[in-house]
Image (cartoon, grey):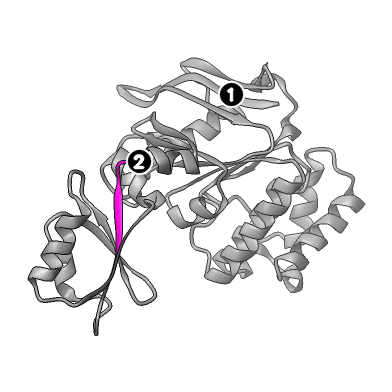
Amino acid sequence: MTLLIDHVTKRFGSTVALDDLTLTVPRGRIFGFLGANGAGKTTTMRICLGILKADEGEVLWDGTPATEIPRRTWGYLPEERGLYPRMGVLDQLVYFASLYGVPAKRARDDARRWLNRFRISDYADRRAEELSKGNQQKVQFIAAILHGPDVLLMDEPFTGLDPLNLVLLREAFVELHDAGRTIVFSTHQMEAAEALCESLAIVDRGRVVASGTLAALKRGSRARTVRLSIEGETMPGWLGSLAGVAAIRPGAGFAELELQAGIEPRDILAAALARGALVTRFELTEPSLEAIFIEHVGRPAEEGISLDQADAA
């Protein structure tokens, strides 16, 4: 089975939120949907679910229009969390599952297993409003998967999670993937996408500007990244002032430099040596997903645009 988003256009008044957007997600893949805030990610997911109607194009699951397949096929984690604040955690998980026809006992047993998995079993009888934002997010994740959907649409699932909870959620993604689920998640967190994605698409202003496997995107990228070590210094302040350096990231004993388009690595080496630096390591590495994103979009993912009214809602 394949999820096909086929030439979808969506307008809000004079604003074009999605502009002839096409994506293909094979069954069983973890698919990253990357874009800045307002690029069209949430609108796309809402059209898949039938919450919004496309002005043009359609969404198909294995050749059948998404509006004609059973609701329980989909699992959805919205960016805006939707728990009942004064309702007990376990009770509302069972309730959400019941909306898809899951028997209460099965839902309760599965919910307890996931609460234990996410290390929040002690909160089963607490009201949702008593939980931290990170723990509420884990409860919302459980609610999205408890009915056993074939396709999971996760809108910014990693936002606001601490490192431990990031690991727990990534492990859950892998487990669901191994069970044959198709997972589409939107994010502007490049590290999470790079760690999980088999395939991905980068969307900007409602259009897909790059798509494919991560390996293929890296092979086709013109972005350049170098790792530089200087004796006695890991991140000298002058690195950021070198002409042609787009971004700097610290590493273990080295600095990783993203180069601007048209800049050759030898230019950076020459500039460092001209400053009297004793360079002990200088190597060209494969581009990061962040560098590929900037190459296609022209700005970091955290820098949003005021385009997609549905995303901003």
Q: Position of residue 112 (x, y in %)?
A: 81, 62
- Residue drawn where x is 18% and y is 56% of the image: 266
Mark drawn on residue 16:
none
Q: Would you say residue 121 is visible in this rendering?
A: yes
Amino acid type indicated by mark 2? Ser
Task: Specify few, some or many for label 2: CA neighbours under 10 Å numbering under 14, 14-19, or 20 or more.
Answer: some
Above or below residue 18? Residue 88 is below
Residue range of the region highlighted in magenta in the rendering = 221-227
Q: Nearer the viewer, residue 53 or 28?
A: 28
Mark 2 vs mark 1: give the one in front: 2
- Residue drawn where x is 53% and y is 69% of the image: 163
Above or below residue 166? Residue 99 is above
What quarter of the picture does the C terminus occupy? top left
What element does badge 1 sit on?
strand
- Residue drawn where x is 42% and y is 34% of the image: 40
The answer to if 170 sits in the magenta stretch is no
Q: Position of residue 98 (x, y in %)?
A: 81, 43
CA gap between label 2 and label 1 equals: 25 Å
- According to the image, label 2 marks what residue? 221
Q: Position of residue 242 (x, y in %)?
A: 13, 62
Amino acid type indicated by mark 1? Leu
